[in-house]
Image: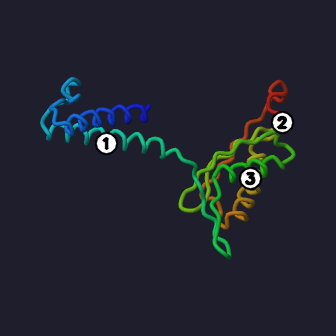
Amino acid sequence: MLVVAAGFVALLFAMRLTAAAFGCAFSPFAYLGVPADHASRAWLLTGVVIVLAVLVWLVLRHGEETLWLPGEAGGVLVPAAALARLAEETACRHPEVVRAEAVLRVRDGAPGGTVRVYGRPLADPARLAAEVEPAVRERLARVVGLAPTRLVVRPRILTVSQLKRHLP
């Protein structure tokens, strides 16, 4: 949509510049209700640039979070989604965990976030959280080099009827 709008504006300016090149006073802006004085056009274009900058910011602010892991000969950028998969895999190693979902963010160079674990029926949620959280924290600390800043494990114990929906 933005490309079409930019093309339309470029076409309008091309029409005006072509008319000026042939010595004609034609301007398509007069038919669009755009003010003819330069100050009004400058304010209008400033508003358009601000709106486009806000749209670009809205698109880019949801970019993928990454974490820089330094190494001996440089380093590597690791997406937070890869660290979340690592946390999910670690949580699923527990015998009482059926499935895990992790949402990790990068803050101050360390991962943090929540890990939702789905436990087998009749499992103890407090014990499950107490056993899964240190394992996930230790594995992330080993990979990243820093302990996660804030890691919350939220257990959800499934009923027998819910179990088949959550099995891999």
Q: Quadrant of the N terminus?
A: top left
Q: Give the alpha-carbon distance from disc 3 to disc 2, as whole Å.
A: 16 Å
Crowding near the residue tagged with mark 1, few <14, some 14–19, many ≥20 C-alpha atoms within 10 Å: few
Q: Amino acid at mark 3?
A: Leu
Q: Is there a contact, CB below 8 Å, between mark 1 and mark 3?
A: no
At a point 25% along the width and 40% down the height, the residue shown is 45
Q: Secondary structure at mark 2?
A: loop
Crowding near the residue tagged with mark 3, few <14, some 14–19, many ≥20 C-alpha atoms within 10 Å: some
Disc 2: which residue: 168
- Position of residue 81 in the picture relative to residue 25 (left or right): right
Vertical placement of residue 162 versus 99, above or below? above
| Earlier-in-chain disc, 1 versus 2 | 1
Q: Is there a contact, CB below 8 Å, between mark 1 and mark 2?
A: no
Give percent across and percent down for residue 165.
80, 28
Q: Secondary structure at mark 3?
A: helix
- Determine which of the numbered discs, if any, sits on residue 87 in the image: none
Q: Nearer the viewer, mark 1 or mark 3?
A: 1
Give percent across and percent down for residue 102.
68, 45
The residue sitting at the front extreme is 22
Vertical placement of residue 128 versus 120, above or below? below
Q: Amino acid at mark 1?
A: Ile
Disc 3: which residue: 86
- Determine which of the numbered discs, if any, sits on residue 50 in the image: 1
At a point 48% along the width and 46% down the height, the residue shown is 61
- In the foreground, 110 or 51: 51
